[in-house]
Amino acid sequence: MSLKTLYTMVLDYKGGTYISQVTAESPEAALTNWVTSANERDLSHWSLTHQELAQLSEDRLIPIENCKNVWCASDSTESGLMLLNIVATET
C-alpha cells in the first residue's frame, strides 16, 4: 500500500485564482489526477478545455526555490498564461 499525500492545486488564469485538492503518491501524479478529474463545470468556470489544461502536465514540474513541498507548472493558451502552483498539504 502506498502512502498518498493531499495536494493543493492553485491555478491562476485570466485574472482568476482557482483552488482545489487531490490525493496522489507524488506531485506529478497529483497533476495528472487533477487534470483528469476536472469536470465540465469547473472547466467552463475557468474558461479552459481539457486539452488546454492537459498542457500543464506535459512539462516537468519545477520546485519552487527556498520552499519545501511546493512546485509550479505553466503553459499558455490563446487567451493567456496558466500558472499552477502545487503544494503538498499533508500526508
Image (tube, rainbow, N blue to C red):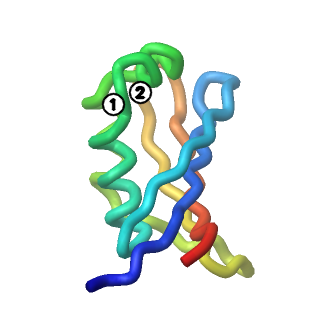
* In front of the other: 39 or 68: 39
Instruction: Pinpoint residue 44: horizontal percent, then vertical percent.
Output: 44, 14
The quadrant of the image that shows the N terminus is bottom left
Q: Position of residue 89 (x, y in %)?
A: 63, 67
Q: Of the residues under marks 1 and 2, which one precedes in the sequence?
A: 1
- Residue 6's spot in the image, x, y percent? 52, 65
Looking at the image, which residue is at 33% across and 30% down? 52
Numbered mark located on residue 52 in the image: 1
Judge left or right: residue 34 versus residue 7: left
- Image quadrant in which you'd find residue 12: top right
Q: Residues within 10 Å of mark 1 (few under 14, many from 20)?
A: some
Q: Is residue 58 left or right of residue 9?
A: left
Which element carries disc 2, helix, strand or loop? strand
**Circle 2 residue:** 77
In this view, the residue in front, 73 or 22, is: 22
On screen, residue 67 versus residue 25, left or right, reads right
Q: Residue at x 47, y 16 (%)?
A: 47
> From mark 1 to mark 2, how far is it between C-alphas?
7 Å
Q: How many marks?
A: 2
